[in-house]
Image (tube, grey):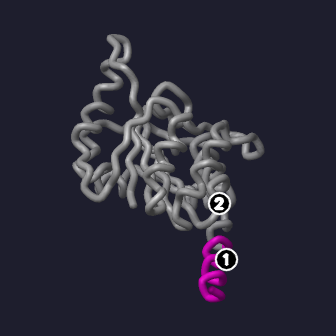
Amino acid sequence: MRVFVIGERPRTSAGQILDLDIHVVAARVTRGEARVIRCATPADLPGELGRIAAKQRIAQLDFLDHGGEGMQTLGDGLLFASDAAPDSELIGIELARQIEPLLTETAQLRLLGCNTGEGKAGRMLLLKLARALRGHRIVFGTIDRVGEADFDRDGYAEVMERQRLFSSIAALDAEAPGAMRRFENMRAVRSAII
């Protein structure tokens, strides 16, 4: 199952221009095979996702709200964030641990705020979040600005996925050259055993 989580906040004159794209996308994305939910605060997320995942685990979880290098917001709060240090703790790690059991073993989690996967902080965000989610889950972040034109009725347009998403696997290879080959070797061995 695919779930598309969109940040919800009241429209204000100060934030209206930035939030307009988010409201347009929320109206455009149809419920088809993806479930669309609005969330006003990160604290509401586990309950909302728990109700959806009670029948079927989530295979793809997309978040759309404001972002920046190494951070993703949701509604009125910070969802996940990292600095550029590999040994610092992920902001939002407890939330990640709460949603981890709701995901399939190979789920994809995509942070669709602007520039979430850019720079060292962005790569660390993807790596730390993938580690917190455990299993064979892959986290994606964007490497460019995100606007309402990037979305169609199915969510983030396929052409944008190819051009602007950066994965935790690519981040691992960027941060530890050769680690990707070791990761792929481990995956091959594990699949041969199972």
Q: Amino acid at mark 2?
A: Arg
Counting from the top left corner in percent of width and height, residue 58 is at 46, 59
Counting from the top left corner in percent of width and height, residue 127 is at 63, 52
Residue at left offset 62%, top offset 49%: 129
Q: Is residue 153 visible?
A: yes
Residue at left offset 26%, top offset 50%: 31
Q: Residue furthest bottom?
A: 192
Q: Is residue 32 left or right of residue 92?
A: left
Number of marks: 2
Distance in Å between CA atoms under marks 1 and 2: 15 Å
Q: Nearer the viewer, residue 78 or 185?
A: 78
| Crowd class of label 2 (few under 14; some 14 to 19; many from 20; radius 10 Å) | some
Q: Amino acid at mark 1?
A: Met
Q: Is residue 24 magenta?
A: no
| Crowd class of label 1 (few under 14; some 14 to 19; many from 20; radius 10 Å) | few
Q: Is residue 56 left or right of residue 71?
A: left
Residue at left offset 37%, top offset 17%: 15
**Disc 2 on helix, strand or loop?**
loop
Q: Report the quarter where the N terminus lies.
A: bottom left
Counting from the top left corner in percent of width and height, residue 181 is at 63, 73
Q: Residue beneath label 2, please?
A: 134
What mark, if any, has residue 186 been given in the picture? 1
Magenta range is: 182-194
Q: Is residue 185 magenta?
A: yes
Counting from the top left corner in percent of width and height, residue 68 is at 50, 33
Q: Nearer the viewer, residue 7 or 146?
A: 7
Q: Main secondary structure of the magenta part?
A: helix
Q: Is 17 situated above or below 61?
A: above
Q: Nearer the viewer, residue 92 or 36?
A: 36
Figure quadrant of residue 168: bottom right
Camera-nearest label, 1 or 2: 2
